Amino acid sequence: MTSAAAPAFVVSVLDRHETELVEQALAAVSSRSQADAEILRNLIDELKATSALLDRQRPLRRPTALGGEARNEQTLMDHLCTLDGLSGDLALPLKATLSRTYLLTKINFLRGFVKATGAIHDIPATVRMTHELREELAQSIYTLLAEELFLALLRKPDVQRRTKQRAADQLITVWDDAALEIDDFAPLLESAWHARNRINSAYGTLLGATETFRLVVEDCNPDVIEFFGREGMSADESAAFEEFLFNMTSEELATLRRAMQQQQVSTASPAWAAEVLGRQIEDLEHFHEIDPMALYRSYQRRQLAADFRLMSGAPGPRRTAEGYLMVYLLDQQ
């Protein structure tokens, strides 16, 4: 497959902007490294094959039957609303798993293009390409995060049935249309993640004022800031927002606050926090370019902690900040 043939493979699985961007990037990489270009062409083929496999699946809302048991949109929603989370993808319809596989394939595809174009330093236009590819990568990772957030809400016993039904309905829509991205169905979440991915925590006195201000500066949707600053917000919602701001769990924040008091430290720094916690403190801002993988790890850390508290009865928020926000949005529908 030559570079000229690449767009024919890409158009059917990417939107117009993505297609044009990939075409330009592949041409730039081909002019510098045929070995890298061949890897990218293979990634295009893999994305196309995964998309074709997904396209062959029955729409999830189309009725069918197996073993004398009727299956339709309502039975699927009822099933999704009873998930306990312990079965993982085994409890999901095949098309749902393939849709997630397609999204993971697209993420790997875009990571390859970011890596290849980022290695080219003598073509000024590739700096713009790498930036735009990284933005597309972030959007795909945010879309995957949104799916995982909906699944997390479905397994929460404290989420009301009608809220779960709306989450299940949204998931079915996303699984049935691989072209949907987070800005199509959860723009507030995209805004929150987009802004959070562009700031580092200053820590300081661990009050979060600086981090909240920087979210505003990075154009986080005002509705997000208003939701987490409203009167009557619960202690768990406040704690979950702190986790979001500082990229760590409530337990880690409590450890830092105790250490500040014991060591008589008035202002915390990332280096000091890393030493106290015994783990690397991950920056979400890297030389004015985002690292969406870091945001994904941040969400997973906070979600695991919330699940543990729910199962063990430990104090602290039972959902992530994103989870509280999404339940509110679903309830407004």
Image (tube, grey):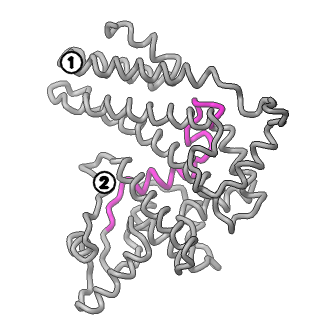
Look at 44% across and 31% down and name the residue there: 106
Q: Secondary structure at mark 2?
A: strand
Q: Nearer the viewer, residue 181 or 314?
A: 314
Res. 69 image quadrant: top right
**Circle nearer the N terminus (1, 2):** 1
Instruction: Indicate left or right for 151 with 305 as reference.
Output: right
Q: Quadrant of the N terminus?
A: top left
Look at 58% across and 25% down and name the residue there: 54
Type of amino acid under label 2: Glu
Contact check, label 1 and label 2, Cβ < 8 Å: no
Instruction: Indicate left or right for 127 with 167 as reference.
Output: left
Query: Which residue is the site of mark 2?
Result: 285
Q: In x, y percent, where is residue 213?
A: 42, 67
On screen, residue 89 above or below 199: above
Q: Nearer the viewer, residue 201 or 53?
A: 53
Structural distance between the alpha carbons of marks 1 and 2: 31 Å
On screen, residue 205 above or below 71: below
Q: Does the magenta run of residues contain 176?
A: yes
Q: Does the magenta run of residues contain 318?
A: no
Look at 25% across and 71% down and name the residue there: 278
Badge 1 local density, few (<14 within 10 Å), some, or many (20+)? Answer: few
Instruction: Indicate left or right for 275 with 328 as reference.
Output: left
Q: How many marks?
A: 2
In the image, the segment drawn in magenta is 175-201
Q: In x, y percent, where is residue 73?
A: 79, 39
On screen, residue 282 above or below 61: below
Type of amino acid under label 1: Ala
Q: Secondary structure at mark 1?
A: helix
Query: Which residue is the site of mark 1?
Result: 35
**Front label number (1 vs 2):** 1
Res. 226 image quadrant: bottom right
Badge 2 local density, few (<14 within 10 Å), some, or many (20+)? Answer: some
